[in-house]
Image (cartoon, rainbow, N blue to C red):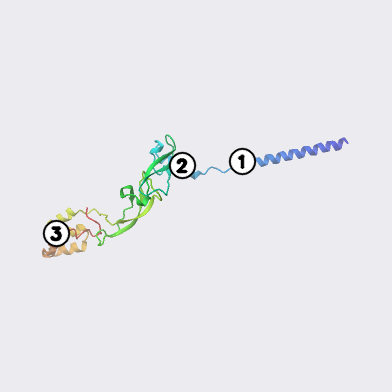
Amino acid sequence: MYLKLTFFIIVISISTCSHNGEFHNEAVPSSGTEKPKDQSSVSAQKQMEHACPYTRCELLNYPCITCTMNETCAYGNETIAKCEARARCIGKETFERPFICQYCYQTELWEHTCVQKANCDSVASPRASYRTNCTVRDDVICLGRRTFHRKLPCNWTGGHRWTTAMILSVTLGGFGADRFYLGYWQEGIGKLFSFGGLGVWTIIDFILISIQYLGPADGSLYI
């Protein structure tokens, strides 16, 4: 009898210990399955804090803030945007800022900057144009994407001055200096060896440059 009772107590003790071990083993992996912090988001947050000035929250601009706007506002009217700071700042991180109801592509030319291109003909008739990317200024609040496409007239300059071309045409036009300056090397050589076409070519080029009909060979405008 005593042996049976002793054996029963030993079995119960072993069963209790095994259950305690199982619970202990289950608790360990549960702590190990916690997701680590996203290193990329932490790094982006640190970069944002370094890029943004430490000032009052309502003085921050893009990309240091995010704003929510009512897209059903009346175009051209002043409305309110609810903004939130994305970096460390002084004061309340949420604030309101007034802005004119319009999409970013509808902003004025002085409110955005565009990528200038110099691969089109500025003196073409009719005036040529090109499509480029434009981005609104950091302090401008507007609807839609802050980077957009815009078609701009081709009006770039290669640094040629009209006054310099005129002076060269008057003084050294017979030797083709004006043609060389504007980038017409073949015509300049022909003008040099023909002594300005015996003066006729020199006079014609002077008239063409004076009325700006003859411009730089790269298709740019005079300064």
The reply to whether residue 175 is visible in this rendering is no
* Sequence order check, earlier mark of 3 and 1: 1
Looking at this view, name the residue that lies furthest to the right: 1
Q: Which of 118 and 113 lies nearest the eye of the viewer?
A: 113
Return the residue at label 1.
31
- Quarter of the image holding residue 96? top left
Going by the numbered disc 3, the residue's amino acid type is Gly
Return the residue at label 3.
173
- Tag 3 secondary structure: helix
Q: Is residue 89 above or below residue 106?
A: above
Query: In front: mark 2 or mark 3?
Result: 2
Residue at left offset 40%, top offset 35%: 56
Return the residue at label 2.
45
| C-alpha span from label 3 to label 1 | 87 Å
- Tag 2 secondary structure: helix
Q: Quadrant of the N terminus?
A: top right
Q: Is residue 169 above or below residue 10?
A: below
